[in-house]
Amino acid sequence: MEIIRSNFKSNLHKVYQAIEEADFFAIDGEFSGISDGPSVTALTNGFDTPEERYQKLKKKERYIVISKVDEEERKRREQQKHAKEQEELNDAVGFSRVIHAIANSGKLVIGHNMLLDVMHTVHQFYCPLPADLNEFKEMTTCVFPRLLDTKLMASTQPFKDIINNTSLAELEKRLKETPFNPPKVESAEGFPSYDTASEQLHEAGYDAYITGLCFISMANYLGSFLSPPKSHVSARSKLIEPFFNKLFLMRVMDIPYLNLEGPDLQPKRDHVLHVTFPKEWKTSDLYQLFSAFGNIQISWIDDTSAFVSLSQPEQVPIAVNTSKYAESYRIQTYADYVGKKREEKQMKRKWTEDSWKEVEPKRLNTQCVSYGLQNHHYHANSLTATSTVGKRNLSPSRAEAGLEARVSGEISDTELEQTDPCAEPLSEGRKKAKKLKRMKKDLSPTGSISDSSAKLFEVPDTW
């Protein structure tokens, strides 16, 4: 049965029932087609770190068109805009019930190359994406305690050697062949199924459907390694735990996935060079520049810079030396490039902090004197003064003591706000993150997984 806007409310109970009865969920949002600004391919390169990839995918660019209209037309457009926003809000609030029901079930959620799907879902139905990657990881695992990416699963042993193409359409075809055993799907009466013989690729529902079929085929294949072999492996089996909460990183050469449950892989990049050159240069110019070093891989950063990976790390010093006296281009090691970026970031942060230190004391003194006068006025007139949001304490000793207690875990953030009348309230993002963290503890037991996650992956030289 197809659930659309017109029949969503009347069939919501059926959706809840399906969530209750399901062993796992397969999702696909086709979000990559509606992202604002440059495409994912244009934004990313093969040597992004997980932090850089997250920041690039999080970034959106807006385009503004300015036109002159009369007063009547302006009012008409405003009414249209308001009506559209209200309609979108009602739809979002309605569908958020489904997302929350899936999250609260604690059941396995499956997708194919699903990082963008997860980011958009968290952003649209929970809270804005945090600036920090680690906060995003914590928030995501609170919302969806178990995620599995079939593209990563197909790219990893024991599937890597027998699956040549991990695009969803090709993967679905390959998993119908030996040694895999595709599941037989029977649809309930009144619920016509998708027909995989007539492909409907890049329709979100169809893609989610065949993603689920791919997962079942690969999970069942893992059962063949057991003694005695099992023909069916459930979504709760320990055999698939090594694939939990690892999201495939597209077009990153040596980091296969984003690890939601801990630190990301840190491959050695001692064979990688950072090259800057004139804007007129093309890929052929870079190949010619490094022609003496054999096979190379090029990942463009922008119009005037790129990463170049050599086949042998010992060739790196030779390549760097060739640019010492060059005027049109410059070559440096990846380590030097990262080190300089880190220094620039620290300098920028220090400059911001130093600038803030000059302004902050004046602002605090003015603000707190104003609050002091207000409170004195209230007490003088025998009025009950309510606490004012945004107060700051003039005494650094109390603030420092509260901070130390919070770090040591002796008092909560809420208690700290109460003890420090001039402390700023917690940001909405942090409050929601804490709420999601509490939610994780309350999830269904079926969604619980062991603290010590199974280890299957090691850092490859090139993925």
Image (cartoon, helix red, strand yellow):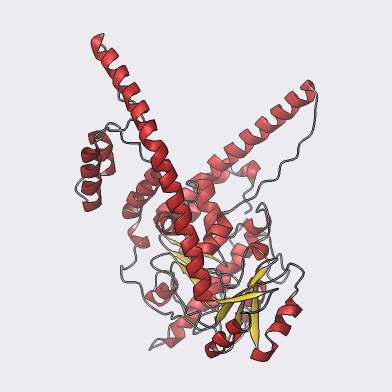
Give the quadrant of the C terminus: bottom right
What count of labels does the image hold? Answer: 0
Q: Which residue is drawn at 57% across and 59% down?
A: 56
In the image, taking residue 111 as reference, residue 236 lies left or right, namely left
Q: Which residue is drawn at 48% across and 54% down?
A: 348
Residue 381 image-quadrant placement: top left
Image coordinates of residue 77 in percent, x first then y, are 74, 29
Image coordinates of residue 89 in percent, x first then y, are 58, 37
Closer-to-camera residue (225/409): 409
Closer-to-camera residue (63/23): 63
In the image, taking residue 286 as reference, residue 163 lies left or right, namely left
Q: Residue furthest top?
A: 381
Q: Can residue 178 be seen in this view?
A: yes
Give the quadrant of the N terminus: bottom right
Q: Is residue 90 above or below residue 122?
A: above
Q: Residue furthest front?
A: 325
Q: Which residue is drawn at 45% across and 47% down?
A: 352
Q: Which residue is drawn at 34% across and 29% down?
A: 365
Image coordinates of residue 39 in percent, x first then y, are 68, 60
Q: Is residue 25 visible?
A: no
Image coordinates of residue 223 in percent, x first then y, are 44, 82
In the image, taking residue 364 as reference, residue 128 lies left or right, namely right
